[in-house]
Image (cartoon, rainbow, N blue to C red):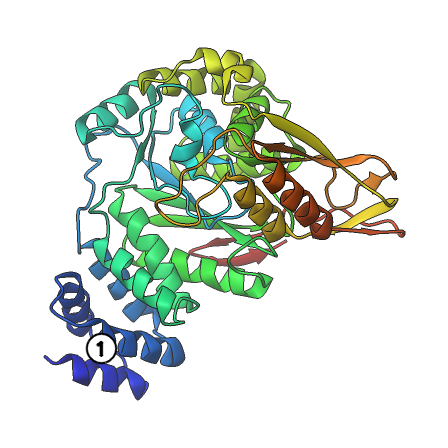
Amino acid sequence: MRMYDLIMKKRNGEELSTEEINFFVDGYTKGEIPDYQVSALMMAIYFQKMNKRETADLTKAMVNSGEVIDLSGIEGKKVDKHSTGGVGDTTTLIVGPIVAAAGVPVAKMSGRGLGHTGGTIDKLESFEGFSVNLPIEKFIQNVNERKIAIAGQTANLAPADKKLYALRDVTATVDNMSLIASSIMSKKIASGADAIVLDVKTGSGAFMKKEDDSFELAKEMVDIGTHVGRNTVAVITDMDQPLGFAVGNALEVKEAIETLKGKGPKDLTELCLTLGSYMLVLGDKAKDVKEARKILEDIIDSGKGLEKLKELVKAQGGDPKFVDDPSLMPAPSIVESVISNEEGYVKGIKADDIGRAALVLGAGRETKESEIDLSVGIVLHKKIGDFVKKGEAIATIYANDGEKQEIATKMIFDAYEIVKEEIKAKQLIKGIVTKDGINRF
């Protein structure tokens, strides 16, 4: 088998066989096939596309390129949740505890964030002493005893995906549905879950800006999950503005705690209840989403979700006092309001610009080597549809550098569009994709 023949075959619009896909993924992972040939194949795939079977085979080949986590030692049906990114996305810190409190095991492996803010495991380090480095035995033990553990991903999880993504990133071949879907799903499948709930974002702060593209990506991922025997559901959600109000690390953790107390932002609460409901259904703890939602609402009202977060923090070496008193978390030296100089209704908030402002402040990583400042970020006070008075604060900036704070202030001003006519609030949940098809709302 020669790589040259695979490149020509795909260039001419033909299907690659399972054996051919396994050959190039295995050879590239081992360093036996050079970058320039795989680059040529990625470009051929970009233009000629892959069918459902090829996409599923590519996913499986990437899964099998490294370690596949064996979670069979965990009792019950394990349901994972994955978000395709966004700004202010702190759902795992809420969904994990409420779903675990309902009895569905949450065995979550997360990566560190590269972008606007830290990833879930970065945010969890706002709890002093919290360790994300758990041996697999301890990870499984924690899930069996407490129904929840959140740890850093093993370095050997789908290594082919890491190599292929790095290559696609520098050869303008990232933006292809099959390649995106297989990249995401390979890591989820290798993580060992029995079922997967996907939160697929759409809008200005999402990877997929167009709603139709988001539904197409969701369908692709659900089809992959179905093909490899994982029951998969995708929820398409709005990211034309940040989720909730907080964008940062400690700030988002504080907002998650408020949400677990039943006092969180409406959109964040709604999304967590929706994602959690599907997790309960896939985990066989509820017959439908209506029953599941009632279970989760009761868990929040009773305080069991907050108690489960404290259990998680304590079990992984963190100080649970931080849950009771979030003021103990890292705090910045500068807290400044961003004051509106006009009056009207918020028509739009460029979510990606708000994210970049948080990155400027130090809330995220520009490179893998960048240090995150857990204390900095932005809290919005006005969302789409809200009325703003002249002289009223539209946001508060939390910073440790005056120059960076001034840059972020300008970026926030530029991100807001305020108009005179009344504006309707955005619809958060755009639709659901299951193995049975697409349901748009």
Q: Nearer the viewer, residue 225 or 206?
A: 206
Coordinates of residue 27 in the picture (x, y in percent): 13, 67
Q: Residue at x 28, y 56 (%)?
A: 162
Q: Residue at x 46, y 57 (%)?
A: 218
Read off the residue under disc 1: 37
Coordinates of residue 238 in the picture (x, y in percent): 61, 50
Q: Nearer the viewer, residue 3 or 286?
A: 3
Quadrant of image for the N terminus: bottom left
Coordinates of residue 61 in the picture (x, y in percent): 21, 61
User: Can the viewer see residue 239?
Assistant: no
In the drawing, does residue 49 fall left or right of residue 141?
right
The quadrant holding residue 137 is: top left
Q: Amino acid at mark 1?
A: Gln
Q: Is residue 329 above or below residue 40?
A: above
Q: Nearer the viewer, residue 296 or 134?
A: 134
In the drawing, does residue 143 fall left or right of residue 322?
left
User: Can the viewer see residue 283?
Assistant: yes
- Give the structural element (helix, strand or loop) at label 1: helix
